[in-house]
Amino acid sequence: MAERAFDVSVNVYGESKCFDDDGRLKRTGSVWTASAHIITAVIGSGVLSLAWATAQLGWVAGPTVLLLFSFVTYYTSALLSDCYRTGDPVTGKRNYTYMDAVRANLGGFQVKICGVIQYLNLFGVAIGYTIASSISMVAVKRSDCFHKHGHQATCHVSSTPYIVMFGVMEIIFSQIPDFDQISWLSIVAAVMSFTYSTIGLGLGVAQVAETGKIEGSLTGISIGTEVTEMQKIWRSFQALGAIAFAYSYSLILIEIQDTLKSPPTEAKTMKRATLISVAVTTVFYMLCGCFGYAAFGDQSPGNLLTGFGFYNPYWLLDIANIAIVVHLVGAYQVYCQPLFAFVEKTAADWYPDSKIITKEIDVPIPGCKPFKLNLFRLIWRTIFVIITTLISMLMPFFNDVVGILGAFGFWPLTVYFPVEMYIVQKKIPKWSGRWICLQILSGACLVISIAAAAGSFAGVVSDLQVYRPFKS
């Protein structure tokens, strides 16, 4: 021990100064870096539909539901943070991903179910991002048209060419290995998401200030004048899905926690970071949703920046929509990387001797290192992007898809698995008071998710009755 105390790489307690207990380089993350990562991950395209969601629910239920979702998200995230280490919260084995935590605490069949839900959710997000990006590209074109020909002009623009354009970009970017590890990518994403979110909020505030009138009602969109009674119910359910989508980040919480230094324990730091980030996000969401609703009332557009509640300043709308496209081009790849890696690893395990799967071809690039082209990666990722592009062209409905994604991912990934893992981790006895309370929370969130899914699918059915494919 005396000899090790004089080793510059070891402190007086015999702990390495350069490496953590799992042999990896010393982690340096803090409560502030974790908060920044969470806020960057959460605030995204989901914020654009919050004014519409608030309009469906009204001034009473809208803000109340936002607050309830924020509380549930914080509480279940705190439960999930206790599952970063298996067993002892200080010395227990680390879980590096959400799936690792499920495997360590629940194991067996539940791991497979979690995997299926996670990868289907990522597939759905790819479709949602394709639709959102194409709508923003169309909005730039229409904004310029309205500026030239006046607000009464038709300015009809089909989204199909822009969906194809986005798909072509993603096919190219999907061939870049480890795209999500590019160091400047998260900085660009953060700047872009805050740019368009802040512009949306600013335009809503300016609209209210200009008119001097707060639109909307206590109960939301009016029955009879705007929608039928049944449509009101379905839209209210769909609004729950849109709000759930805006708060979805559980899948990456464990990965963010894995960047934190200790002491204090990673769970303690993560709980503080979650509280800060959820509080900041909720305030921002309340401002965006409420000011958007105050500005437009029952006419609140499904996408605040593309529904043309605003026409001017047109250049500011263009900047916001270009920022959305730039953000989502990168976000598409970041979200799809785990799915790409899973399929490619599975293929390599099943067919280890296949040259198509394992061989990499050096493609010379003047002035750069040769690009390593893998045939299986080229074929599989291209097919994946083509499928998401085709589905987006067949169903380019932003609000419906956002609602479905929120409903599908919220209960299992944000509530059920964190609750079940926490019960196992803390050895909470079955039928004890705490166990019953946790199950009631999980059951209530399941009901909300089912209602949100039903409302969103009803929206898809309604839109398909008037929509002609490839003519949007």
Image: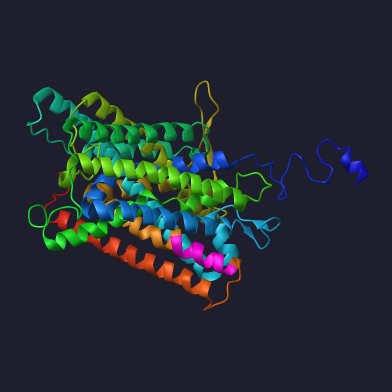
Residue 308 locus on image (x, y percent): 18, 36
Quadrant in which the C terminus is drawn: top left
One can see residue 329 in this view: yes
Residue at 12% x, 36% y: name it: 156
Nearest the camera: 21 or 131? 21
Say left or right for 256 vs 463. Answer: right
Magenta region, mostly helix, strand or loop? Answer: helix
Residue 148: quadrant of the picture: top left
Q: Is residue 95 above or below residue 311?
A: below
Q: Is residue 37 above or below residue 89?
A: above
Say left or right for 386 vs 215. Answer: right
Question: Bounds of the magenta span?
Answer: 415-424
Q: How many numbered markers are drawn?
A: 0
Residue 397 locus on image (x, y percent): 23, 49
Residue extending furthest toward the front: 212
Nearest the camera: 74 or 45? 74
Say left or right for 107 vs 283. Answer: right
One can see residue 400 in this view: no
Q: Is residue 421 magenta?
A: yes
Residue at 44% x, 35% y: name it: 190
Q: Is residue 46 magenta?
A: no
Residue 36 locus on image (x, y percent): 50, 39
Residue at 15% x, 57% y: name it: 462
Say left or right for 2 vs 390. Answer: right
Residue 446 locus on image (x, y percent): 37, 67
